[in-house]
Image (cartoon, rainbow, N blue to C red):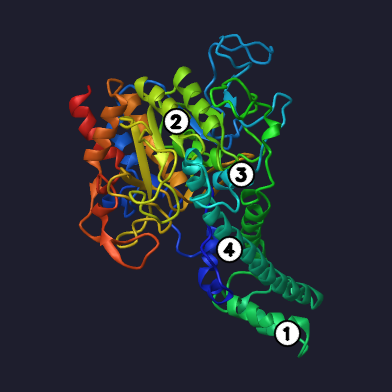
């Protein structure tokens, strides 16, 4: 799931600089462990895990397996290597499928977007781009009146995808040009400062830079002053480095995500037209960029109370790693196979911090979701980061089956902030009274990243694993609880607030209860107290 930058004009850049500045350069930041805290006791609307563990300290627990379908996980991370799932039926490195599950040496999980030769997919196109590329040769220039009736449904899908693709590509191309222009101006000022022996230039000392009237540097100073004077204590070099995030984002959109001529699938070597094909990929579960998946895994399961890094929410859990999410949109076939693998190999919970606006083969995912549901697996899904009402706009995958009915073990999560009302909801978070179940911490979340490092990230991608971690604690300490029981308890124990909150993507305020089915935010302590009365 990719973070979407807002449309930015140069005039608005200074006001939206926090979108690209690292949290370390911002002043309005919470404690690193805020998502563990309790609003009433600590002043932060976390999941109340600290209070929960005070209640659970004399109780026994069982190990719960959480499958993380994501970009990959650094399984050697100092704070994760002790909690990575190990396939008990597989002998590592012998080149055999010891447990006869169809996957060779799947010691810690499986990578469905890698090739047999060890190659890896990193970037991929968005689903709408793939739809336009697939149907374009047949439908380009056609109208509903000129296509055959048998092709009408696919034509409508193509037309909807093309309309969004054309608009997004124009926006990305404009954004890339705009940010590159700002970066070029900053580079000129930084180079001039270096030539004058100024080691650190920022808003507070910008006036000390001697600039020749009419020079290129003087021209650049207009924009730089606008940025720097509103962030006087942030070095221009830090701002320049942060701009690389925007340049990488827009560059990735133009070159990969929205490029109809880009298709890396040959790396995998499967028959992509066969959605029922299951046995492809490799066992290299980290992948080329495991930032997202490693961050997600840490929120759920980073080793607690070891004195390093940070604490995950669950204390007796193993992370099964399933790599299916590239830098771009995941493919339905890979998602379906990941869900089936998790269900077949002992996962109690599946975390799915991804989503998209179009689906290529919804049925294959529906069938996998139904399969996992029948096996009692809890499927925790991120609601998405587009600030939209998902009761009115589609996001895939979904709990609703194309053929009718819905999964009873699907849990859809919006992102909450550490702030009090009216800013208690992440401004990016999707919402929906019908299709979002509750809100969970998803803003400024400090967690594990590759190479035994740690950093902040935000999104419903972070809110979902926080909820998955809470669910894992319940399943661990109260093993009689089914997936449906967990959902029921978390919904009933959710913390309600009567205060209004800012509607994501808008300036108006609405009742917090109108944004999700539960009308509240997750709370492990309250859930544990409720579970303890019924599931001893």
The picture places residue 315, in percent across and down from the top left corner, at: 41, 30
Assess disc 4: are there few (<14), some (14-19) or many (≥20) residues with their C-alpha within 10 Å of its C-alpha.
some
Q: Distance between the Cα atoms at labels 2 and 3?
A: 23 Å
Residue ID at (49%, 35%): 302
Mark 4 or mark 2, which has the lower sequence index? 4
User: Does residue 42 appear in this view?
Assistant: yes
Residue ID at (21%, 39%): 492
Q: Distance between the Cα atoms at labels 1 and 2?
A: 59 Å
Residue 311 vertical position relative to residue 424 in the rendered view, above or below:
above
Task: Answer left or right for 30 relative to 254.
Answer: left
Residue at mark 4: 171
Task: Answer left or right for 118 relative to 231.
Answer: right
Under circle 4, the secondary element is helix
Near-viewer residue (94 or 452): 94
Mark 4 or mark 1, which has the lower sequence index? 4
Q: Which label was assigned to residue 138?
A: 3
Residue at mark 1: 218
Residue 205 vertical position relative to residue 358 in the rendered view, above or below:
below
Near-viewer residue (27 or 95): 95
Query: Foreground mark, 1 or 3?
Result: 3
Under circle 2, the secondary element is helix
Query: Foreground mark, 1 or 2?
Result: 2
Under circle 3, the secondary element is helix
Extreme-bottom residue of the structure:
213
Residue ID at (52%, 38%): 360
The picture places residue 334, in percent across and down from the top left corner, at: 55, 30
The picture places residue 445, in percent across and down from the top left corner, at: 46, 49
Residue at mark 2: 363
Query: Foreground mark, 4 or 3?
Result: 3
Task: Answer left or right for 76 relative to 425.
Answer: right
Assess disc 3: are there few (<14), some (14-19) or many (≥20) residues with their C-alpha within 10 Å of its C-alpha.
few
Query: Foreground mark, 2 or 3?
Result: 3
């Amino acid at each position: 799931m990719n973070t979407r930058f807002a449309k930015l004009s140069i005039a608005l850049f200074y006001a939206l600089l926090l979108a690209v500045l690292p949290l370390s350069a911002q002043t309005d930041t919470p404690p690193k462990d805020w998502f563990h805290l309790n609003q009433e006791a600590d002043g932060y609307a976390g999941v109340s895990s600290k209070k929960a563990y005070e209640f659970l300290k004399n109780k026994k627990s069982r190990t719960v397996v959480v499958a993380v379908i994501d970009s990959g996980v650094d399984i050697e991370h100092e704070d994760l290597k002790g909690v990575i799932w190990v396939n008990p039926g597989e002998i590592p490195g012998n080149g055999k499928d010891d447990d006869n599950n169809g996957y060779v040496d799947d010691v810690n999980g499986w990578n469905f977007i890698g090739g047999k030769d060890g190659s890896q997919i990193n970037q991929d196109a968005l689903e709408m781009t793939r739809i336009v590329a697939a149907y374009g040769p047949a439908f380009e220039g056609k109208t509903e009146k000129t296509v055959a009736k048998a092709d009408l449904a696919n034509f409508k899908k193509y037309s909807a995808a093309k309309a969004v693709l054309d608009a997004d590509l124009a926006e990305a191309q404009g954004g890339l040009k705009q940010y590159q222009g700002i970066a070029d101006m900053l580079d000129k000022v930084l180079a001039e400062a270096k030539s004058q022996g100024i080691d650190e230039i920022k808003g507070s000392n910008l006036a000390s830079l001697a600039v020749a009237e009419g020079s290129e540097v003087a021209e650049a100073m207009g924009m730089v002053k606008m940025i720097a004077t509103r962030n006087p204590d942030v070095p221009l070099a830090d701002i320049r480095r942060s701009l690389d995030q925007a340049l990488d984002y827009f560059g990735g959109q133009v070159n990969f995500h929205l490029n109809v001529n880009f298709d890396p699938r040959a790396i995998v070597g499967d028959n992509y037209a066969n959605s029922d094909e299951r046995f492809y990929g490799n066992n290299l579960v980290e992948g080329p960029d495991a930032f997202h998946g490693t961050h997600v895994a840490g929120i759920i399961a980073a080793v607690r109370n070891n004195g390093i890094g940070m604490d995950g929410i669950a204390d007796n859990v193993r992370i099964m790693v399933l790599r299916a999410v590239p830098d771009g949109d995941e493919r339905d076939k890979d998602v379906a196979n990941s869900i089936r693998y998790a269900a077949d190999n002992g996962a109690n919970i599946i975390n799915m911090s991804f989503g998209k606006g179009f689906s290529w083969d919804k049925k294959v995912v529906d069938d996998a979701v139904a399969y996992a549901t029948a096996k009692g697996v809890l499927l925790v899904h991120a609601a998405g980061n587009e600030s939209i009402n998902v009761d009115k706009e589609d996001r895939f995958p979904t709990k609703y089956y194309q053929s009718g009915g819905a999964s009873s073990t699907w849990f859809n999560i919006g992102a909450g902030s550490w702030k009090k009302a009216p800013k208690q909801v992440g401004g990016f978070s999707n919402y929906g009274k019908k299709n979002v179940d509750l809100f969970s911490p998803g803003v400024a979340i400090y967690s594990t990243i590759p190479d035994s490092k740690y950093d902040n990230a935000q999104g419903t991608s972070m809110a979902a694993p926080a909820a998955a971690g809470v669910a894992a604690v319940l399943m661990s300490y109260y093993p009689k609880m089914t997936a449906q029981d967990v959902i029921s308890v978390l919904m009933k124990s959710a913390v309600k607030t009567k205060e209004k909150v800012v509607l994501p993507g808008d300036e108006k305020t609405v009742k917090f209860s109108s944004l999700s089915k539960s009308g509240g935010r997750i709370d492990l302590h309250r859930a544990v107290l409720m579970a303890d009365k019924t599931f001893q």
